[in-house]
């Protein structure tokens, strides 16, 4: 029997810590509109992915080595390199399939680094056999394309990050 105040021999405390960290990461992902977030802390890597509809997050955890010092407190989750605060996010206005070009052999509408005007076509989302052109809601430079060609997207999912003109 473990002395009072000592860490338990089982990983029950670690399970509680992982569950709490998972809940916090899911809340951060929802708050920032992210579809996926990954954090590594105290030898444990935790990734939370949001499904097509708001559901329980999928968690993949790698337990910390047994020889490591016991963690008595949970450090706050740190999110880095999410997006510059001034970045403009272009989100999917509907559920469907994301396409970067009008045809499989055509050039993409935009590439990372391209400067776009407000109203310029950025991509197409196919929904119910209809091709919907998605336009830029602001002028700026494409910093990041967040979705791969041919991938399904959900309503509100971030598609592009734009840096506004200076």
Image (cartoon, rainbow, N blue to C red):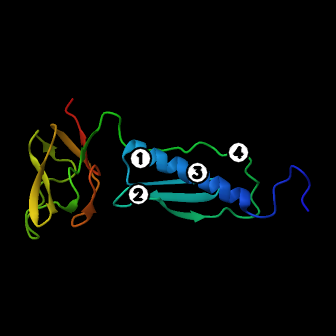
Q: Earlier in the sequence, mark 1 or mark 4?
A: 1
Name the residue that disc number 1 marks: 30
What whole-number distance in Å separates the C-alpha atoms at marks 1 and 2?
9 Å
Q: Position of residue 70 (x, y in %)?
A: 76, 54
Residue 65 lies in quadrant = bottom right
Viewed as shown, does residue 4 lie left or right of 23? right
Residue at numbered disc 4:
73
Mark 1–mark 2 CB contact (< 8 Å): yes
Of labels 1 and 2, earlier in sequence is 1
Taking the image as shown, residue 122 lies to the left or right of residue 76, namely left
Query: For the residue labelled by badge 1, is the local secondary structure a helix, a strand or a loop?
Result: helix
Identify the residue at image location x=48%, y=50%. Answer: 26
| Label 1, residues with CA under 10 Å away: few <14, some 14-19, many ≥20 | some
Q: Which residue is rendered at x = 15% and y = 43% of the image?
A: 136
Quarter of image, res 137: top left
Q: Is residue 142 above or below residue 40?
A: above
Please give the label number shown on residue 21. 3
Mark 4 secondary-structure assignment: loop
Q: Quadrant of the N terminus?
A: bottom right
Where residue 158 sits in the image (x, y, percent)? 29, 49
The Cα–Cα distance between marks 2 and 3, rounded to whole angstroms, is 15 Å
């Amino acid at each position: 029997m473990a002395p009072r105040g000592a860490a338990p021999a089982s990983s029950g405390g670690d399970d509680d810590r992982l569950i709490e960290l998972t809940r916090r990461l899911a809340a951060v992902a929802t708050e920032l509109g992210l579809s996926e977030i990954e954090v590594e802390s105290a030898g444990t890597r935790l990734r939370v992915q949001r499904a097509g509809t708001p559901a329980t997050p999928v968690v993949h955890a790698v337990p910390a080595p047994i020889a490591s010092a016991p963690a008595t407190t949970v450090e706050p989750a740190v999110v880095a390199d999410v997006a510059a605060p001034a970045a403009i996010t272009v989100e999917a206005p509907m559920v469907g399939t994301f396409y970067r070009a009008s045809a499989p052999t055509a050039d993409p509408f935009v590439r990372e680094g391209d400067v776009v005007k407000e109203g310029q076509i950025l991509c197409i989302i196919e929904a119910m056999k209809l091709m919907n052109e998605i336009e830029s809601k602001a002028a700026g430079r494409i910093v990041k394309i967040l979705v791969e060609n041919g991938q399904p997207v959900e309503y509100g999912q971030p598609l592009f990050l734009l840096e506004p003109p200076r």
